[in-house]
Image (cartoon, rainbow, N blue to C red):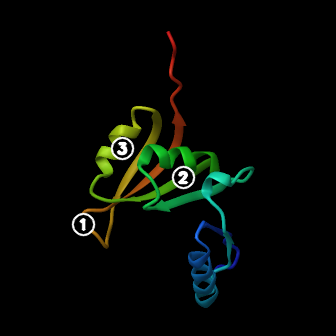
Amino acid sequence: MDTSLETTLIESDQRKCAFLSTASREIGVNARILAQRVETIVDVSFDVVSARALAPMDRLLCLAQPLTAEGGRMLFLKGANAQAELTAANETWNMEVVRHQSVTDPAATILDVRKAVRRHEHLG
């Protein structure tokens, strides 16, 4: 296993953090687990930010984009409403998105998002 990979998991639920700690230790993954809400994470960036069942796409982009390093990517697992969420997010975000079909759920998709920039509303 490649031990040079740095993995950070963010989870606000202490019980889930205990599970993640045990699971990562048992499978040999070196993971730092932050027991806090994602909204409180500042002054750090990651090459890849991933989320599952966290928020609708527009809100998810607001949470993940500040944590994504320059040239990084965001991977979001989305269900049957993925297209509707993308359409809504495109109202306020410019981004590159590649869709990957889930191999475990035919109704689900993985959205590979890069270069997400929030559009500025022009007054006037």
Q: Is residue 38 visible?
A: yes
Q: Which amino acid type is shown beneath numbered disc 1?
A: Pro
The N terminus sits in image quarter: bottom right
Residue occupying the point 57% across, 46% down? 65
Q: Which mark is residue 73?
A: 2
Which numbered mark, 1 or 2, is in the foreground of this view? Answer: 1
Q: Position of residue 4 (x, y in %)?
A: 70, 74
Q: Is residue 68 visible?
A: no
Compared across the picture, whether 53 is left or right of 117 comes to left
- The foreground one among 71 and 19 is 19
Q: Is residue 94 above or below residue 15?
A: above
Q: Quick one: label 3 or label 1, which is nearer the N terminus? A: 3
Q: Quick one: label 1 or label 2, which is nearer the N terminus? A: 2
Q: Quick one: label 3 or label 2, which is nearer the N terminus? A: 2
Q: Quadrant of residue 29?
A: bottom right
**What element does badge 2 sit on?**
strand
Q: Residue furthest top?
A: 124
